[in-house]
Image (cartoon, rainbow, N blue to C red):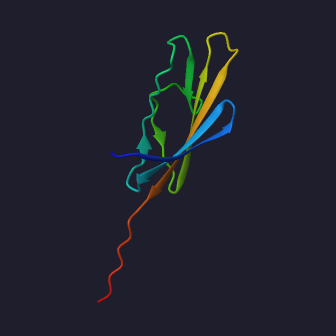
Amino acid sequence: MFVQFYSHFKIFKKSFCFQGLLACNTNKLLVTPTPPDVKNVVTVNGDKPGTPTTLNVGSTNIEIEVTSEDGSNKQVCCFVFLTYCDIIISFL
């Protein structure tokens, strides 16, 4: 599967968002982030990394949260995936 990311922008100091396009026949996505320190706590939509995320038709938000071991620092990265289908119209 090919995932295309575009439009990286900063929402506020500790949060970043990305957008990606997926083919409409994609129904699940496996997100496995790697934290900068193995002691960091990482969640994907509140679950452990490696849990498949079911994609909605249209738009799906996936939030990755990384928290320092002592809980003093937290960073959130959100991904918005849009599913699309190519439509071919032909006239006879």
Q: Where does residue 44 sit, x and y in percent of width and height?
A: 54, 31
Residue projecting furthest to the left: 92
Q: Give me the residue at 45% from left, 33% from top.
A: 31
Q: Give me the residue at 37% from left, 54% from top.
A: 25
Is 26 or 84 nearer to us in this picture?
A: 84
* Vertical side of 29 occupied by 70: above or below: above
Tell whether 56 sits left or right of 91. Answer: right
Q: Quadrant of residue 76?
A: top right
Q: Where does residue 27 sit, x and y in percent of width and height?
A: 42, 48
Total number of numbered labels? 0
Tell whether 92 sits left or right of 31. Answer: left
Q: Where does residue 45 sit, x and y in percent of width and height?
A: 58, 34
Location of the N terminus (image quadrant) = top left
* Vertical side of 73 occupied by 1: above or below: below
Q: Give me the residue at 42% from left, 51% from top.
A: 22
Tell whether 52 sits left or right of 64. Answer: left
Residue projecting furthest to the bottom: 92
Q: Quadrant of residue 42?
A: top right
* Vertical side of 10 occupied by 59: above or below: below
Location of the C terminus (image quadrant) = bottom left
Q: Where does residue 79 sit, x and y in percent of width and height?
A: 54, 41
